[in-house]
Amino acid sequence: MQRRTVFLAIGLLLVLFAAEGHPTEAQGSSVSFAKDVMPILQKNCQACHRAGEIAPMSFETYENTRPYARAIKAAIQSRKMPPWFADPQHGRFANDRSLTAAEIETLSRWADDGAPLGDPRDAPAPIRWPEGWQIAPDHVVTAPAQTIPAEGTIEWGYLLVPSGFTKDTWVSSIEVRPSSRAAVHHVVVMVRPHSSDVPANVVLWEQKQRDAKGTAPGQAFSSASRASRILGASGESVNRSAVDGPVAGVYVPGVPPQDYRTHGAAILVRANSDLVLQVHYQTIGKPVSEVTRVGFTIAKEAPARQFVTIVRQPASISDPKIFRIPAGDPNWPSPPLEAVFNADAELVWMMPHMHARGKDMTYRLTYPDGRTETILHVPRYDFNWQLGYDVAEPIKVPKGTRLRVDAHFDNSAAKRGNPDPTVDVYAGTQTWEEMMNPWFGVIVDSRLDVRTLVTTTAVQGGA
């Protein structure tokens, strides 16, 4: 089940609540929509609950919000909304949209009091949300249209598209915009030097042998695929990990554009480079034509620091003898990811990624002086919400610091959304398989060769 499916389910719940009757206007209430509720909605809810976004209803006006007052109370008291999964005991995050106890009390009292409007003059000014592109791009690359079939298994594909940059360019933000979001699971954008041995504008598909249940043990990231050609020239390999290394941009439902300006940083795209788009399409019951565009803003001057987005995974993830989640196991410890930083850096962003059986994930740093710090703990991972966590203050990571990421998986019948708890599960690219991919973003000196920044070390044991 994807995030949009969860929103539809929650939307249906809200509609059912609303259908029981609109709350009547209360007289003399100390909590009003204009003065007390709207500021909370603007800060915590409207990013999704607005016209044209993924939520099925808008909370931008009193008229749109009032019918859902009691449903909002139920959703916030159960902590289903807003979605946020970081343990507050470990780290502070700038994009934390979770509600405080006082905010939950305010929204609940508003619903209990009949959802009064109050004095409209007390309301904050409406937020002018961006329409279309969120970053106002200076440069846009458009991939050729792809037809996504109505049914069947679609393996990952790799599409090389010329970047169009004719000189070395510092890019300050990137936004990936699919035209058919329902049929696009993700798009990852990488940059590689131009090479004439890979055809442009042609998707190279991974090739896997799957059994009747769709499993492909030992083929987590296929080295035999023609797709390995498209990454080979840049030193990357589909066999190591489809996105094991620095990436430029990513689209996953719910993840905002990558805006490096927030950190006073940018990424360097060399002249005449190619973009590699790793595409994961999903069928939706009807054929779909998809056109993916990638927008860039360009820095006016070279920055002192560059942003690096890195995706790593356990070295043993492709070994079915090691990475095998037993049928029915409610708390299987994954082999951890361990990596060492080979240069000074500042860690500013993390995004755990697993599939339907993912249970929890924890990021820990061990500094050169032996001190250990848990920088992110997600005790209740939810595959339907691909959340990134922006640290409130950059975490200084000296050279020699070790990053360890541990995760557990729940392959039992009690795990909601588990495709089949009766089978062993292996690593793979499809949603019924599993991943243990910790993403993280760091800032480093702009002169550093980012390919040498992090070294993954082989660790076989689980947590």
Image: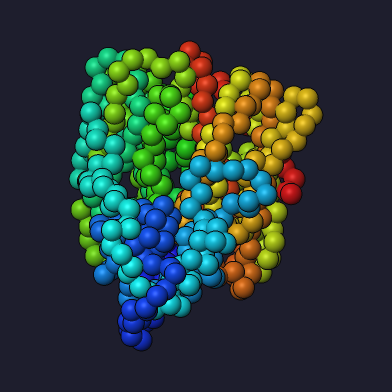
Residue closer to the observer: 436 or 52: 52
Q: In the drawing, does residue 196 fall left or right of residue 314?
A: left
Residue at 54% x, 61% y is: 102
Residue closer to the observer: 74 or 283: 74
Quarter of the image for residue 230 reads: top left
Residue closer to the observer: 404 or 346: 346
Residue at 28% x, 62% y is: 120
Residue 329 position in % (x across, y down): 68, 65
Residue 104 position in % (x across, y down): 52, 65
Can residue 90 be seen here?
A: yes
Residue 91 position in % (x across, y down): 63, 43
Residue 5 position in % (x across, y down): 39, 66
Can residue 273 be seen here?
A: no
Image position of 369 with respect to 179: above or below? above
Quarter of the image for residue 248 reads: top left
Q: In the drawing, does residue 255 fall left or right of residue 177?
A: right
Quarter of the image for residue 39 reads: bottom left
Residue at 66% x, 46% y is: 90
Image position of 253 with respect to 69: above or below? above
